[in-house]
C-alpha cells in the first residue's frame, strides 16, 4: 500500500508518464490486482496504440486474470504491429492449448520457432499439443529436439518417455523415464515418471 501511494503521488505530478504508469500497473499485478493493472494498461494502449510492449503487458495481465480470449486479442495486436515478436506467438500457443484449440496452438508455436529457432519452450509445448491431437510420432520428434539442446530437461525426458510408450517402444520409454527420475526434483513429476516407468516395464514383457 505504501508503494502504491508513492506511485499515485508520482503520477499526480506526471499524469502522462507512461513509464510511471506501467511500473504502477506491474506493481499492482504483482500484488494480484490484475483488474486495476489491466485498466491502467488499457488507457496506455489507447494513448499509444502502436506500442507493442503495452499490448503485450496488458495481455499478460488479462491472461493472469483468466480472461484468455481478451488476452488473445491483445497478443494478436502485438503480432500485427511486430510480426516477429516470438514470445507473443509462444504465449498465444499456450492460451490456445489451455482452450483445447490444439491445431491453432501448433501453428502459433511454429510461428514462435520461425522467429526464434532455439526456443525450447515452444518446441516442448508444440509436442504437448501434437500429443493431444494424437500425433505421437511428431510429438516425440519435438521432445527429441528439445533434449538435443537440454539433455537434462526433466519434463522433456518425461514427455519423450510418454510418447515412446504411445509408439510401443517400451524399453526406450523406460530409459527416458530413468533419465527423468535422475534429474527431476518436482515431486509430482517424479511420481508420474515412476508410475509410467512401471507401466512401460510391464508392457515390455
Image (cartoon, rainbow, N blue to C red):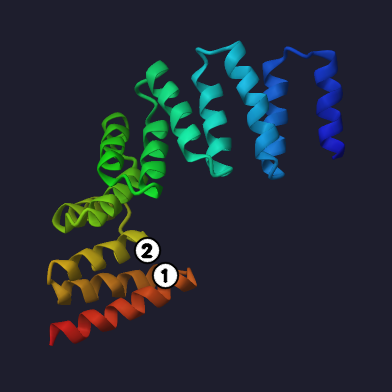
Of helix, strand and loop, which one carries label 2? helix
Q: Quadrant of the C terminus?
A: bottom left
Q: Residue 183: x percent and y percent? A: 39, 68
Residue at (50% x, 33% y) in the render = 70
Q: Residue 4: x percent and y percent? A: 81, 34
- What separation in Å lies between label 2 and label 1 (alpha carbons)? 8 Å
Relative to 18, say whether 2 is above or below. below
The tag on residue 63 is none
- Nearer the observer, 175 or 167: 167
| Quarter occupied by residue 181 | bottom left
Left-right relation of 82 to 202: right
Residue at (65% x, 39% y) in the render = 34
Of helix, strand and loop, which one carries label 1? helix
Q: Residue 204: x percent and y percent? A: 14, 83
The numbered mark, 2 or 1, whose residue comes first in the sequence reads: 2
Left-right relation of 130 to 98: left
| Quarter occupied by residue 6 | top right
Q: Which residue is mark 2?
A: 154
Q: Which residue is mark 1?
A: 189
Relative to 100, say whether 56 is above or below. above
Amino acid at each position: 500500500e505504501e508503494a502504491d501511494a508513492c506511485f499515485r503521488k508520482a503520477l499526480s505530478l506526471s499524469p502522462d508518464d507512461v513509464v510511471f504508469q506501467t511500473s504502477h500497473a506491474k506493481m499492482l499485478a504483482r500484488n494480484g490486482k490484475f483488474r486495476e493493472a489491466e485498466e491502467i494498461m488499457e488507457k496506455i494502449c489507447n494513448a499509444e496504440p502502436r506500442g507493442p510492449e503495452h499490448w503485450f503487458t496488458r495481455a499478460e495481465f488479462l491472461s493472469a486474470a483468466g480472461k484468455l480470449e481478451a488476452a488473445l486479442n491483445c497478443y494478436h495486436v502485438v503480432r500485427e504491429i511486430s510480426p516477429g515478436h516470438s514470445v507473443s506467438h509462444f504465449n498465444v500457443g499456450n492460451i490456445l492449448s489451455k482452450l483445447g484449440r490444439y491445431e491453432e496452438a501448433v501453428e502459433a508455436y511454429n510461428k514462435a520457432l520461425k522467429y526464434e529457432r532455439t526456443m525450447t519452450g515452444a518446441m516442448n509445448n508444440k509436442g504437448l499439443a501434437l500429443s493431444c491431437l494424437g500425433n505421437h510420432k511428431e510429438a516425440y520428434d519435438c521432445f527429441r529436439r528439445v533434449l538435443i539442446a537440454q539433455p537434462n530437461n526433466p519434463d522433456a525426458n518425461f514427455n519423450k518417455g510418454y510418447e515412446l510408450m504411445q509408439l510401443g517402444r517400451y524399453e526406450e520409454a523406460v530409459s527416458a523415464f530413468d533419465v527423468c527420475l535422475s534429474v527431476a526434483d518436482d515431486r509430482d513429476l517424479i511420481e508420474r515418471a515412476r508410475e509410467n516407468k512401471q507401466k512401460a516395464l510391464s508392457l515390455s514383457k
